[in-house]
């Protein structure tokens, strides 16, 4: 009952009222990133959702588009703007995904949607993470996020798929708030962003 009906009801109303409540903050960040990123405050990217269906995820854009002399993008750490770094460290870059939740592309809680090009690299076990809608936060995020290995992330994602419940989602939500306050696990140990998944 919770997984098939109540979870969607909770997702929609929590996201809708959350977006209204946070709209002043949303506007301030949008304006700041508009100037920091040459008029591009948002980042759009194709990601796989439930059953691998592709949708466009929306996030605040934390890195600019600067390139080197050969026209290649500079390393991530060099393109990460000051305001972008703050937005990422506080996890505010995820805020626009409330729109994805309202649209039913995502859930508040679930496995994080990864890059579309990873779809062909998953084992059958790893691919089970797509049996549910992806989330803004999830079991893997509150148990290490970018600081844990890919294999561990997938184990945690599939465990969540097999154990979804209202109480588990509330536990993840509370732990997410705690993690954000402590700014834990935002980046991989030696990089501004996590290393790509290679199968």
Image (cartoon, grey):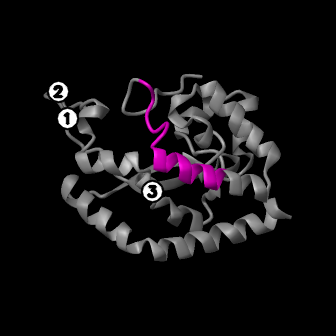
Q: Residue at x 17, y 30 (%)?
A: 68
N-terminal label among 1 and 3: 3
- Asked if the magenta segment contains residue 126, the reply would be no
Q: Mark 2 falls on what kind of element?
A: loop
Looking at the image, is 4 positioned above or below residue 71? below
User: Quadrant where the N terminus lies?
Assistant: bottom right
| Residue 39 in view in this figure | yes
Looking at the image, is 58 positioned above or below residue 198? below
Q: Position of residue 124 (x, y in %)?
A: 75, 30
Q: Position of residue 136 (x, y in %)?
A: 56, 53
Residue 58: mark in rendering: 3
Q: CA distance from mark 1 to mark 3?
A: 23 Å
Q: CA distance from mark 2 to mark 1?
A: 8 Å
Residue 70: mark in rendering: 2
* Horizontal arrangement in the rendering, residue 176 relative to residue 10 (left or right): left
Q: Select label 2 or label 3 by which is in front.
A: 3
- Asked if the magenta segment contains residue 178, the reply would be yes
**Residue at image mark 1:** 67
Q: Position of residue 120 (x, y in %)?
A: 62, 31
Q: Position of residue 132 (x, y in %)?
A: 72, 50
Picture quadrant where residue 126 is located: top right
Say whether marks 2 and 1 touch (CB < 8 Å).
yes
| Residue 62 in view in this figure | no
Q: Residue at x 41, y 55 (%)?
A: 92
Camera-nearest residue between 136 and 51? 136
Say whether marks 1 and 3 touch (CB < 8 Å).
no
Using a 10 Å C-alpha cutoff, classify the residue at mark 2 as few (fewer than 14 neighbours), some (14 to 19) or many (20 or more): few
> Residues in magenta?
172-189
Q: Mark 1 falls on what kind of element?
A: loop
N-terminal label among 2 and 3: 3
Residue extending farthest to the right is 1
């Amino acid at each position: 009952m919770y997984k098939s009906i109540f979870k969607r009801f909770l997702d929609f109303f929590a996201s809708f009222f959350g977006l209204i409540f946070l709209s002043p903050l949303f506007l301030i960040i949008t304006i700041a990133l508009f100037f920091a990123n040459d008029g591009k405050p948002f980042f759009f990217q194709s990601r796989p959702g439930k059953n691998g269906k592709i949708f466009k995820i929306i996030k605040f854009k934390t890195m600019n588009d600067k390139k080197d002399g050969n026209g290649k993008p500079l390393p991530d750490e060099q393109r990460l703007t000051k305001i972008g770094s703050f937005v990422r460290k506080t996890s505010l870059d995820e805020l626009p995904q409330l729109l994805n939740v309202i649209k039913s592309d995502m859930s508040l809680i679930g496995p994080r949607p990864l890059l579309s090009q990873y779809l062909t690299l998953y084992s059958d076990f790893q691919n089970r993470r797509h049996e549910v809608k992806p989330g803004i936060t999830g079991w893997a995020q509150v148990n290490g996020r970018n600081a844990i290995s890919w294999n561990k992330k997938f184990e945690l994602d599939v465990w969540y798929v097999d154990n979804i419940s209202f109480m588990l989602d509330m536990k993840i939500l509370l732990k997410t708030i705690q993690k954000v306050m402590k700014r834990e696990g935002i980046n991989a140990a030696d990089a501004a962003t996590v290393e790509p998944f290679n199968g």
